[in-house]
Image (cartoon, rainbow, N blue to C red):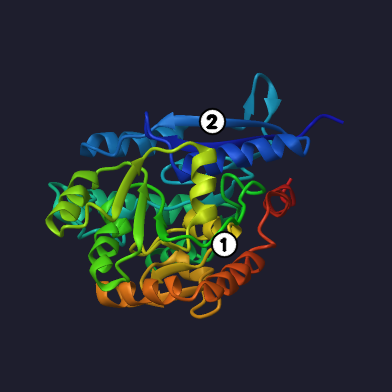
Amino acid sequence: MRKKRIAVLHAQVPFTWGGAEYQVQKLTDNLVRRGYETELIQIPFKWYPKNSLLDSMYLWRMVDLSEANGKRIDMVIPTKFPTYGVNHDNKVMWLVHQHRAAYDLYDNQTHFGFGTIEHGEEMRQSVYSFDNVVIRESKKIFSESKTVSDRLYSYNGIDSEPLYHPPAFAGRYICGEYGSYILSAGRLDPLKRLDLLIKSLPFCDKSIRLIITGIGSDQDALVNLVEKTGLTDRVDFAGFVTEDELIQLYANAFAVYFAPVDEDYGYITLEAFLSQKPIVTCRDSGGVLEFARHEENALICEPQPEQIGEAFSRLYNNKSLCEELGNTGKLSISNINWDNVVDKFVAFL
């Protein structure tokens, strides 16, 4: 019997690597590990100017993945916009996200929401029309989180099933001590609201330090904010760190900050819990709240510096509470693994 052939589809922004890139690569690797002939197929994506966005949509629509080299492709797994435009009789989607500039970020200037740019409304209608047709062609629609499912239903009236997956270094995270610093990991982007974290430090115990890893478009603004507020002796911008360094930073933090705006999924929540660390987050942080439970494995605040600072002081001065919440966090995500993800997809072969 020949091996079943599966194509995982990804729209790649050149020279960019993040959560979506990790997700599609690990899905491909784990399908191969389970004995399926699997290929990751990527096409460069550029959403601007207007014609580039339309070209990307039409390009995926024209791709023929019914067979390759005379052999049938048994399943395609589209992920983020516009990969799900592909034509195939066994299209099983794992939605990372739609093009958010046409939806919940429509009025967001920082992320070029279509409501803030020339020809934006026309582009929005094109994306709406595209999504409403091609997504419904799927035999099954999984999403990466309940937050993504809720958006899809709210804007397009389409049902989907959340399907969670583990973070990059699952199996390697460890718990060391509950030290004297807060850890913030990930891309430095305005939606991650690291400005709130920095503004919370004056409301914390003065012994608390902050380590911020990662790079991104918001870096200069954040450095300027630290200098303006006189916090340079308490904040360390670590930049890019290695895998081993990141694991150690998680291991010895007393808590992790992760309070983005309406996050799609958020590996940092899972990374913190696997390291047995509590997180401090906000009530509007989207996918984070699918795992975070107030007073069980996290402290959930209003997006206000005073509340966030008070939460960190409470944890810093009660390390047994950090340990209790962190241990509960690890137990709460113990059933998230790649075998479950693969089982869901191969059921449609």
Disc 2 marks a residue whose amino acid type is: Ile
Question: Residue 268 location, x and y as percent?
Answer: 48, 55
- Residue 56 visible in rendering: yes
Precedes in sequence: disc 1 or disc 2: 2
- The C terminus is located in which quarter? top right
Closer to the camera, 333 or 97? 333
Left or right? Give the position of 35 relative to 145. Answer: right
Residue at numbered disc 1:
273
Q: Does 342 sit left or right of 315 as displayed? A: right
Q: Where is residue 1, by image quadrant?
A: top right
Q: Position of residue 192 (x, y in %)?
A: 32, 57
Residue 341 location, x and y as percent? 67, 52
Residue under the point 73% across and 50% down:
339
Query: Residue 236: percent from the left, percent from the top?
Result: 31, 48
Does the CB distance between marks 1 and 2 fall below 8 Å?
no
Q: Residue furthest bottom?
A: 295
Amino acid type of the residue that numbered disc 1 sits on in the rendered structure: Phe
- 321, 37: nearer the viewer: 321
Residue 267, compared with residue 47, is above or below; it is: below
Give the secondary structure at mark 2.
Answer: strand
Could you tell me how far apart the alpha carbons at marks 1 and 2 are, in whole angstroms? 32 Å
Q: Which residue is mark 2?
A: 41
